[in-house]
Image (cartoon, rainbow, N blue to C red):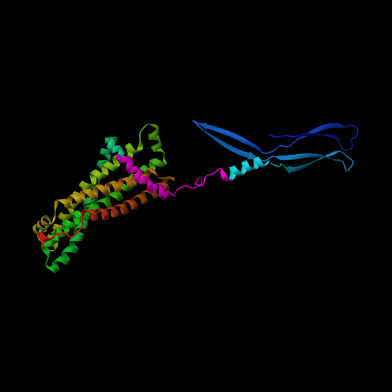
Amino acid sequence: MQAASHCYPLHLSRRGSYNKVSHVNVKVLSLNWLPRRFDFNQGAQTRKVLKPFKLKRFCVIPNSNDGHPSLSVSEEDTTASKEDTSTVEEWENGGETFLSKWSPPRYLWRGLSVPILAGQVIIRIIKGKVHWRNTLQQLERVGPKSVGVCLLTAAFVGMAFTIQFVREFTRLGLNRSVGGVLALAFSRELSPVVTSIVVAGRIGSAFAAELGTMQVSEQTDTLRVLGANPVDYLVTPRVIASCIALPFLTLMCFTVGMASSALLADGVYGISINIILDSAQRALRSWDLISAMIKSGVFGAIISIISCAWGVTTLGGAKGVGESTTSAVVLSLVGIFIADFALSCCFFQGAGDSLKNCV
């Protein structure tokens, strides 16, 4: 800090009173740029924050043009040195890195949270860090409490496909092939996909809404303060429950769908139930049911991980919870269809001969 002191003798008096004169010495300080430094020490790191400010120079000039002593003050900027100016410009221009003001889009870091969360769940399961009480509660919620809506949906889907198949196959004289076609369609595609869609709408939305509400109300932070890992306590039980419950729900939906199809074909179109069941038995292989269960397990993992990831990354209060719930269901459905295509390409390649025995 540089300072210069100058003294000016001044004669001050009141107008109309010339008998009292006093001498005053006025000191004027000329200050250059003064940086203020604050040091924040964290461990072995030292961060310095510079906040320069510009000072003014005030000059007192005696003026006695009118015959009376008076003061006039002029204001002018101080001239900073080149070193101080370069410091300020470095702070304003070069103190920030290229990516300091850039933040990734929300959809990008939310999308990256899905594989990260999936990896954490897999590591927790391998290490055995599973909250079994919560897992059983979520298993009851995903499985038994979802049976009714899943079976009802499968029954009506089976009857709708039966109407279309019977009408067309009857004209071709292929009544004995109706059961085999229905069995293959239900086991390979319809049962796992329809069951997963119902579960995504019912359970996936609930997962996203619950975890989103806990996130915006800071309940997940409370779990961390209490020493509990939110992934172990909230996410892993939901993923395990979904992966276990969906294969069994798929088998039940397949059974109900075939039963409703056989009843409709027998009661409306006159095709015997025995013909439908015999044709289905000839066309089905064990791999068809195994592939359906594998698909269902994968779909359950997709639904639960996407819903939980969207829940724990919720921002914006009640509005954010609603947006996260909607986005979680939509992305779960898209993931189900993409995974179904990929798994179908892996499981069923080349020409098939399943319908030869039921023609």
Q: What residue sits 23% from the left and 52% below the top?
A: 192
Q: Quadrant of residue 261?
A: bottom left
- From the top left corner, tell me how far across and down residue 8 is, in percent: 82, 35
- From the top left corner, tell me how far across and down residue 39 is, in percent: 56, 33
Magenta segment: does it hold 104? yes
Left or right, residue 223 beside residue 91: left
Q: Nearer the viewer, residue 161 or 87?
A: 87
Position of 229 relative to 206 (above/below): above
List the single residue furthest toward the right. Answer: 19
Q: Is residue 117 visible?
A: yes
Left or right, residue 144 beside residue 56: left
Q: What residue sits 29% from the left and 50% below the top?
A: 200
Q: Main secondary structure of the magenta part?
A: helix
List the single residue furthest toward the front. Answer: 83
Q: Quadrant of residue 337?
A: bottom left
Q: Nearer the viewer, residue 90 or 34?
A: 90
Q: Which residues are magenta?
A: 93-122
- From the top left corner, tell me how far across and down residue 102 is, in percent: 49, 48
Magenta segment: does it hold 338? no
User: Split into 4 quadrants, where in the image is the N terminus?
Assistant: top right
Q: Is residue 130 visible?
A: no
Position of 348 relative to 22 (above/below): below
List the single residue furthest toward the bottom. Answer: 171
Q: What residue sits 40% from the left and 35% below the top?
A: 222
User: Split into 4 quadrants, where in the image is the C terminus?
Assistant: bottom left
